[in-house]
Amino acid sequence: MKEYKTTGYASAKTGKVSNYKIVSEFKAKNSGKEYVKLESFGKNPFSFVVLKENLCSPTLPELRPGVPTRICWECGRSFSYAQCKANEGDWSENYCGC
C-alpha cells in the first residue's frame, strides 16, 4: 500500500474543509510559485491542482459510537484507528500521535 501525506483544503465555493491526498508537488517555472496536486478519497477519486499556500491542516476523524478504541500510553486519551493514522501515531504501540 502506497504511503501518502494528507492535507486539508477549503472549498472556494462553500468554505468547507475536506481532506485530500497529496499526489505530487511542483514549482511553476515562470512564477516560481509552489503547487500541489490533490486527490480525493473514495471509490471514484478526482484530482486537481492548487497553490501550496492555500492548504490547511487536515480535519481529524470523529470518533463514532461502536468503533474500537485504545488508550494512548503518553497522554491517556481514547483514540480510534482512523484518528491514530491521521495523527501519524502507532496503533500497535497504543500511541495516538499526540
Image (cartoon, grey):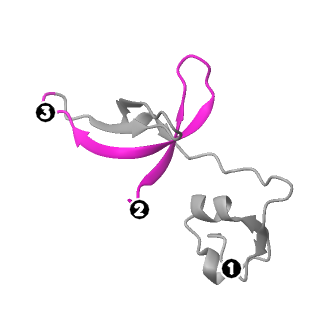
> CA–CA distance between discs 1 and 3?
45 Å
Magenta residues, start to end: 1-30
Q: In which quarter of the image is the N terminus?
A: bottom left
Q: Which residue is drawn at 79% across and 71% down?
A: 77
Please give left or right for residue 97 compared with residue 63 in the image: left
- Neighbour class for label 3 at 10 Å: few (<14), some, many (≥20)? few
The residue at which mark 2 appears reads as 1
Closer mark to the observer between disc 2 and disc 3? 2
The residue at which mark 1 appears reads as 94
Please give left or right for residue 57 compared with residue 1 in the image: right
Does the magenta run of residues contain 19? Answer: yes
Q: Residue at x 48, y 37 (%)?
A: 40
Mark 2 or 3, nearer chain start: 2
| Relative to 1, residue 59 above or below | above
Q: Looking at this view, is 1 or 80 the one in front?
A: 1
> CA–CA distance between discs 1 and 2?
22 Å
Q: Looking at this view, is 74 or 65 the one in front?
A: 65
